[in-house]
Image (cartoon, grey):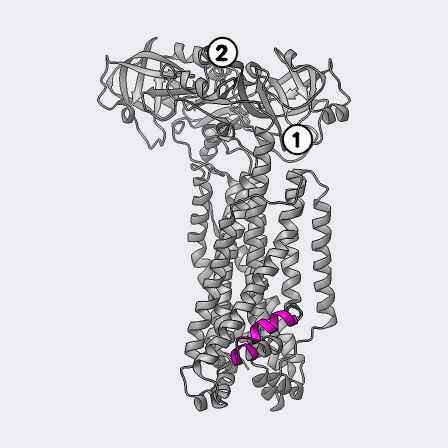
Amino acid sequence: MIRLAITTLRYRTAAFLAILVAVLLGGALLSAAGGLLETGLRLNAPPQRLAAAPVVVTGDPAYHPPNGSGSAAFPERHRVDADLADKLAGTPGVAQAIADRSFPAVITPGADALTGHGWASAALTPYQLTAGQAPHTGQVVLDQRLAGTSKPGDRISVTVNGRPQTFTLAGIAAAQRQVDVPSVFFADADAAQLAPGVDAIGVFPADGTSARDLAKRLELPDGVRAYAGDDRGVAEYSGIATSLPLIIMSGVFGGMVAVVMALVISATIGLSVRQRRRELALLRASGATPRQVGKMVIAETMVVGVIGLVLGLLCGRFAGDWIFGMLADGGIVPSQLRFDQGPLPFAGAALLTFAVLRITVGFAAGRAARIRPIQALAEAAVPEVALGRVRLIIGAVFAGATVSIAMSTLFMSPTNAAAIGGPAGLTGSIAVAILAPLVIQRALVPRLTALIEKRGTSGVLAVINLRVRAVQFAAILIPITIATTIALGNIYAQTTQQKAAVEAYTDNLAADVVVTSTSGGIPASLTDSARSLPGVTAVSELVRSKGWIEEPYDTSHTSDAWPLLGLSGPVYKGEVTKGSLDDLTGDTVALPPGTAKKLKVDVGSEIGVRLGDDALVKLKVVALAKGPSGYESILLPAALLASHTTTGLPSQLLLKTHDQEATMKSMVLSEWPGSSVGGRDLLASGYDAGLGVDAWIGYLLAGIAVAYTAIASINTIAVAVLDRRREFGLQRLTGSTRRQVGRMLTLEGLVIAALGLVLGLIAAAFTVLPIAVATRGWPIPSGPAWILLAWVAVVLLLVLPTTAITGRIALRSKPMDALSSAVG
């Protein structure tokens, strides 16, 4: 049987090519998902600017809930006490400890945002002077990439912490290793005034002392950690704090790949086996046992599958690099993070792909082996469409699960709705895949069949074929339905959530004019200037960050943080149910009423809030302010919150005016380089809705859907059409022309494509509409309509040209030759 199985491959090229490509793509994507998982677990980021220091000490960049599980990246730089550097310098085994301070610094005019440092930290790279000398008070040293035509002694303008200042260029330095972002170095005394906190401390071990051993035995305060090797990148780059986002992404991504691959391979193998029922029946009739037939089907499929798996693993590295590059370009992971894809991701991908392939082909082989020879010969002429009772029950279970998930999503909070409602589309598409032949027959209602039959003989034949060959057409319907569900469901779910989050944020802030800055933030002098403008009725600085309520502990936000809004003026539009936001000054806070009730606190109570830089501050509750349901924020004074952010400055300035245009024209921002003014649309600029990882998961899944749809649709259509050579030959002998047969195929393709799109949209609606209700309050999703139109065009461009080309190939031979064809 093994030899017969290998021989069969020569005559079933199209079917086995479909399986090979599906397995190849699945193996490559699963390898990529495994690489993302390994990268998330390792979090290796070789340092650049701090590379010369064997040990780097910094604040723990991850928040660990006191009564919860998991961790989350601090949204701000977690700095350490400046005195710690002196303490470490006196530790046995330490030769030198150098503090590094960072703060916004921009060379003006026209330069991009950069970072300023004290000159002592140049040794952490190291930098070496190529001209001039070390800086004294009022002087700077520039990276040679920033110097241009400037030379030591020139006066240059540097915007520091949002304020333009003039410094003397003391020298020019060059990094002795690759450093992607150039730096501006100030005198250490100036840097200490500009940045009171220390970002990191580079520790140099004494001769004979191991860096890793020293990192382990350093006595450090709570919340401070020492790193060695590639782990030092955690101290240099923001965002490398926790592996959770990449682990979640790789898990969802890999799981979806496995499910889609199983459905597509199952449909393709099932189609191939059904088309060979006459051949298999003859084998049974000639003495082959059910076990032998099953072994032959398994052997021939596994030979092709293993070849596809090997090719997929070879492509896995390229797929992983490509996907990781997209994530880095999208800001989901730091670009400095190293993509690690060792042997384990490939081994895991090989085992999982092999298991999926073996299980799916096992089911198909079981069906082929169980059928009786006479029954198989009859079904080869008239394919069976009836589904077994077990299959109907399984399909009904998935359909019921889809409805249950969708209904429960309607009554959830926006955060939970996004997490719980997503699987509804997948379970719905699985239900369609299981019940596909029955769905095709039930969809052929009299109105639809009458419309098709109006096309003449071709239409009549198309209707007959759709009814009789519902099982074969189901193999084409399944990938279209699954892809439509995944692609449109994920994309529109993300656009709907993003729109709802942005609306909830912007609608709560009253501002006609918004000022933003690219030089680190809004300085106090710009705020004072805005207050003096004619027609301005209110001015408020705006600071955005995240934090956690720890005293009393808020169990509703453990690893996920509360949005924090810092305000300094009357611009908040939410209803204040108790207290007054006029009292929001100093060490105070305003809470959502529901949260205050849950925590059993009220106006006048004191709570402890863990801010984004790990500072635990005690705040007095002065007001209870409502926000949009599911999108509530904690309000703090802008000055307090800004002092605990990385830049130390407000991110935007909000103005309420009598005349928006007049105010915008009267604002002169030349004194504050990098500042710009605009309307309310700027409120959403730079707003982090917290959907970055979720959005990229959705987009990656949509990409998988597109890829598998293209491959599976083309392959299954080609297999199905080429297998009908005998049928086409018989039609032509009875009087049909090539054109009539071609029109029949086109009508069949249009019906299946349209049915797949409709079913996919219905399944996607079970995800998108409940999420829209939960996030926006009404069942109307947000998102550009061109995405839907583009997807319809993609499906039609896949189905119709493939049908036309393979139909032309199938009709190339003479009718009598087609009847005697070995296949089809």
Rendering coords of residue 761 (x, y %):
60, 56
Residue in the foreground of this view, choosing between 395 and 539: 539
Task: Identify the amino acid type marked 2.
Answer: Arg
Task: Identify the amino acid type marked 1.
Answer: Pro
Residue at the (51%, 16%) spot, across then down: 84
Residue at the (34%, 16%) spot, across then down: 158
Rendering coords of residue 492 (x, y %):
56, 47
Determine if the magenta segment contains residue 420.
no
Q: Which residues are magenta?
A: 444-460
Left or right: 576 in relation to 527: right
Residue 462 visible from this viewpoint: yes
Q: Residues within 10 Å of mark 1 (few under 14, many from 20)?
A: some
Answer with the quarter of the image where residue 126 lies: top left
User: Which is the main secondary structure of the residues drawn in magenta?
Assistant: helix
Q: Secondary structure at mark 2?
A: helix
Residue at the (69%, 54%) spot, across then down: 402
Left or right: 707 in relation to 587: left
Q: Which residue is mark 2?
A: 531
Looking at the image, residue 267 lies above or below residue 236: below
Left or right: 554 in relation to 350: right
- Frontmost of labels 1 and 2 is 2
Mark identifier at residue 628: 1
Residue in the foreground of this view, choosing between 779 and 642: 779
